[in-house]
Image (spheres, helix red, strand yellow):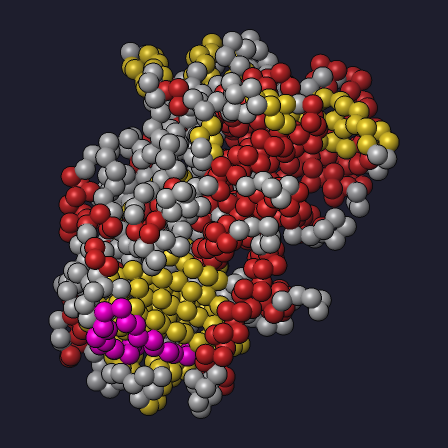
Amino acid sequence: MSSHLTPEHLRLEEDASRKKNWKRWGPYLTERQWGTVREDYSANGDAWTYFPHEHARSRAYRWGEDGLLGISDREGRLCFALALWNERDPILKERLFGLTNPQGNHGEDPKEVWHYLDSTPTHSYMRALYKYPQAAFPYERLIEENARRSREEREFELEDTGVFDESRYFDVIAEYAKIDPDDILIRITVANRGPDAAPIHVLPTVWFRNTWLWGCKHEGCTLKPRISKLDDHLLTLQHESLHSFRFAAETIAPWLFTENESNNEKLFGSPNLSPYVKDAFHEAVVHGKADTVNPREFGTKAAAHYRLMIPAGGEVVLRFRLAAAHACPTVPFGDFEETFATRRAEADAFYDVKCSRALGPEQRRVMRQAYASLLWSKQFYHYVVKDWLAGDPNMPPPPPERKLGRNRDWGHLFNADIISMPDKWEYPWYAAWDLAFHMIPMARIDPHFAKQQLLLFLREWYMHPSGALPAYEWNLRDVNPPVHAWACWRVYKISGAAGQRDTHFLERAFQKLLINFTWWVNRKDVQGKHIFAGGFLGLDNIGLFDRSKPLPSGQSLAQADGTAWMAFYCGTMLSIALELARTNPSYEDIASKFLEHMVEIIDAMNDVGDGGLWDETDGFYYDQLLIEGRHTVPLRVRSLVGLLPLLAVEILEQDVIDQLPGFSKRLKWFVKYRFDLAQNISYRKIHTQDGTTVRRLLAIPTRAQLERVLKYVLDENEFLSPHGIRSLSRAYYHKPYQLKFDDSEYCIDYEPAESRTGMFGGNSNWRGPIWMPMNYLLIEALERYHHYWGDDFQVEFPTGSGNLMNLNQIAHEIARRLTHLFLPDAHGGRPCNGGDPRYAGDPHWKDLVLFHEHFCGESGRGLGAPHQTGWTALITRCLNMVARDREEAPSQP
């Protein structure tokens, strides 16, 4: 181990080498287990109705656990989280509340305020904040007002209800510091931000996930675990596979005990298995029913019950320790504050290494919270499709309709892993293409975890036997864009210097990616002409109609984005194969295959007048409706669909080709005998200080086509906004695009913020907003184009300004605009926070940043899932670009 590494770097090395299991405990609880597919055993597949929020406090979960600012072990067996009550709420606050998809005027939506503030990759230090109103939580008002609002109106948020007025709320901060892998210190700070003293009940809660009722063999727990009281300060926690743990409380409070089992009597009118059930603490605290908790002081769920009266502006600190029995000292809190100070300082030291010193304080704050939110988004995800379809031995069998329902053809899928989630409330299930983007920023801070995650989705218990990757639990067979290969390639390069990279990882990934690539070619090239379809491809409502469903009159669709994604996939596989061929000549043949396949796709994409997707009149790429498989109707909508062809760009360096005699020979043959295709490969001599070299460019657009498309991209009346690249041209704001076809009329217009269509649930919108992953891919593509064309390729930025820039400068300018989403403006507000004055001036709000799913194409206001830091954490890469520019030109703002 290198002496210059920080203690957190050393912990990462210890964990990766399995010397110490530093990641055994982390923020692995989901924020919402209710309303998920894996908890749905209904006949009709209505997950929201089958397991609603109202059931969550009383009903044991089958596949996971949720909690407030909590942690668990990596198999979700033992959990810790907070429960709160302000003496006005109708229920104990044990989890985050939000609207279901049918309830929200723009789909499902959490109605709480919480922020992830800090975390190291090993979770040796973590910090998160929850803002809890002192007034009664407005559950009904949030439901009723959002139901009243139309899709034309904004969502009604908790901040809009007035419960935070006059600062009448509590800031509840949960902090964790590890002494050792199985020894965790917990500090809970409750601060009264209001003008008057206010009461609050705090219940730090430990419980075991229910694995004993179902009769399922693979859970690894055949005996019921037990939590019991040792003395007024200490609990003992016994579990078959975790063995013995202790939970210590510094401040004495009454202990409450119950079982993590459903209240069947309340929910279903059937007898309870035990008199002490999951919602006992709610009944005891909120309704004063002392007989609902176990007087014998044992169970599978326990909490210390603190009733605090906190003065105006005051705060109370509660301290706890969760540790393996052998690690828990007789004086549990002697080294408490010293350990916290050390771990916090070590976190600072780690991020000082990871964040450029060229970044200003606000930029560093954004980067630190982005990494924290990315790391807090890890979740123990458990879903065994075969058992879910068949039902559990100790439970009634599911309705027969399930055998014909969703995911029935994914019986091999066995998920029981820590996985990076898009958003642990709104999307508490993985999405394959989201995860690929997550791993790009993750590779900067934890390359081992990034590589593990990417390989996991290629393993045989994830990948379908056909070669398809699982999309997400609502429909595992759906089609996400094929970005996994790109993520593997980028993580490989990010996580090691040239000559020191993890070739073993790259080779493992490549072998399985070949299977997935073959699935794409066999399933999505309908006519065998290298023009691809693929469904909605993650872009939800970007089309005139739902591209995942049969089209009007049974016509088919040739997709510019589907075809571009396949060229992108080919190019990435070519680059990986060439890299592997440098040390293993057997990869030269497959490199040749991907070279020729990519050229075939490029040729088909640009074949004007014979099924190609380039429109010479407009200078843009469009989807084409195929009528009876022959006649084509272009869908002339300028959207991201037509920008994605720009992403498929790879460069062949002559010095690499010279090292590969088999590939070089095939390339020469291809250029000589397939000139009709080889003309799609650009050739350029580059003069350097060391002499002259040759580069070849593989890209869908020619230089002239690229210039024409960029005129739209960089036009502020089209795609270019102050905060990045929009997903749909602003030109459709005043004049929507309309298409009459088969006696039906279709229309699409520019919608810069919330979606006005219910397509795909309506909680995401690709008809105008800014999406971080697409912007980032475009930035990388422009950098590659610049590497080939150099400084003599310059275009106006913005279009019509007369200001010329090269493509690298333009890429970095787009990155800079994206960073402005999160940085304070001249009035102190961050565009992503949507103009709420609290976030501009209140000292307890102004430093808080949210990393939304997407952003308004006009104002930059955050939209969709508010904690979708997975792919929005790509902002850290943009901040690094800004930092590099500042280092090279210190006068740059």
> Above or below — where is 418 with respect to 854?
below
The majority secondary structure of the magenta stretch comes to: strand
Residue 165's quadrant in the figure? Answer: bottom left
User: Compared to 893, does 647 lie above or below?
Assistant: above
The residue furthest front is 891
Query: Residue 581 vs residue 520: left or right?
Result: right
Residue 304 is inside the magenta segment: yes
Task: Residue at 24% x, 83% y: name it.
Answer: 254
Residue visible at 17% across and 54% down? 138
Query: How far across and how far down the image is residue 525, in percent?
Result: 54, 25
Residue 784 in view of the camera = yes
The magenta stretch spans which residues?
301-324
Q: In the image, is residue 608 part of the stretch drawn in magenta?
A: no
Instruction: State the image coordinates of residue 39 (x, y, percent, origin top left).
Output: 32, 55
Residue 626 appears in which quarter of the rendering? top left
How many callouts does the rendering have? 0
Residue at point 42%, 46% (across, down): 824
Of the pair 826 and 501, the residue shown nearer to us: 826
The quadrant of the picture occupied by the C terminus is: top right
Q: Residue at x 34, y 75 (%)?
A: 317
Quadrant of image for the N terminus = bottom right
Percent across and percent down for residue 319 are 37, 78
Q: Residue 324: in sight, yes or no?
A: no
Left or right, residue 362 beside residue 492 = left
Relative depth, front residue between 799 and 321: 799
522 to the left or right of 260:
right
Which of the 4 image quarters holds residue 92? bottom left
- The answer to whether 399 is drawn above or below residue 136 in the figure is above
- Percent from the top left, x then y, of residue 600? 65, 22
